[in-house]
Amino acid sequence: MTLELFLLLASALVAVGLYGALSQQSIVMIMMGLELMVNGVLVGAAAFWYFVSPQLPDGQVLVLLALAVMAVEMAMGFAVTTAIFRARDVDMTDMAADLKG
Amino acid sequence: MDAVDTVAFRVLAVLAVVSGTLVFRVDSMARATFLLLASFLCVAGTMLLLDLDYLGALTMLMMTVEMAVMVVFMVMFMMNPAGLMPMTMVHNRRGALGLSLGTFVFLAAGALLVPWPDRRGAPPADVTRQLGESIMEGKMLVMLVVGVALFATMVSATVLATARGRYDRYGDELERSRPDDPVPGGVGR
């Protein structure tokens, strides 16, 4: 168990999440990809706390912040999905490409 | 770090990545959500290995409830929620694969090549107390900002998800005595 192994795990999670966020068409699946990316941040922050500076609380606070980001992202994501589904019956990103240009 | 921890970490790490990958491979939305939950639980397990008892438990509890909520939305918004027929709903798959592989190589190279600093100090006897004291003392700004952000999220999520609020029904000044509803009738009207 070393810092490098933990960071490899974090990189893998971020990469998988990025693939999901980029490739999925459903808005809900995109949010799952984003959650996986923040999951990688959790691992990275926890590992940095433990292996680099365990006597300072900064790493732990970063983990707490990432958890709050996850909660906010999910709530706002579903609110936006509900709003756009109600207004235009859209549940896929390709149907909401108005700003593409 | 003894051998048991090392083995446990490797198993959890592999499980976390594999279940995270399977999220985008299975047809069933419910299965995808619970695979994501499995990935979160494995990550929480690695946090427990790092003596982060409180944050590990917090991650487990929060993600279990979050995924339980998420599965409802998945079934609500997805066609074919049960995954009874195979389907793929992806665009630009090759580009996404390339980008994510490139990101992994870049991050992994950084993780392996950067000379990370040596460990300074040791974990305190009570890790949770360290966190609690810091967010109530030196890092209180973080807690304040998170609190305000969560409150703003609650308000704006409710506003966004409301179909027809009272301003739609009673006018901008709430001046109508009878609500303007698409379907008249109802209790008290």
Image (tube, coloured by chain):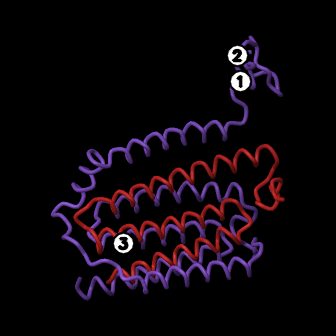
Amino acid of disc 1: Tyr
Do residues under tags 2 and 1 come within 8 Å of each other at their CB atoms? Answer: yes
Query: Which chain is purple in the rendering?
Result: B
Q: Which residue is mark 3?
A: B45
Q: Quadrant of residue B3?
A: bottom left
Whether B57 is drawn above or below B153: the answer is below
Residue at screen point 69% across, 76% down: B96
Q: Which residue is mark 1?
A: B167
**Secondary structure category for the residue under label 1:** helix
Q: Quadrant of residue B92?
A: bottom right
Position of residue B130 measured from the top left corner of the image (x, y, whole percent): 23, 56
Q: Is residue B134 left or right of residue B98?
A: left
Q: Chain of mark 3?
A: B
Q: Which residue is mark 2?
A: B174
**Secondary structure category for the residue under label 2:** loop
Q: Is residue B163 left or right of residue A75?
A: right
Q: CA distance from mark 2 to mark 1?
A: 6 Å
Q: CA distance from mark 2 to mark 3?
A: 52 Å
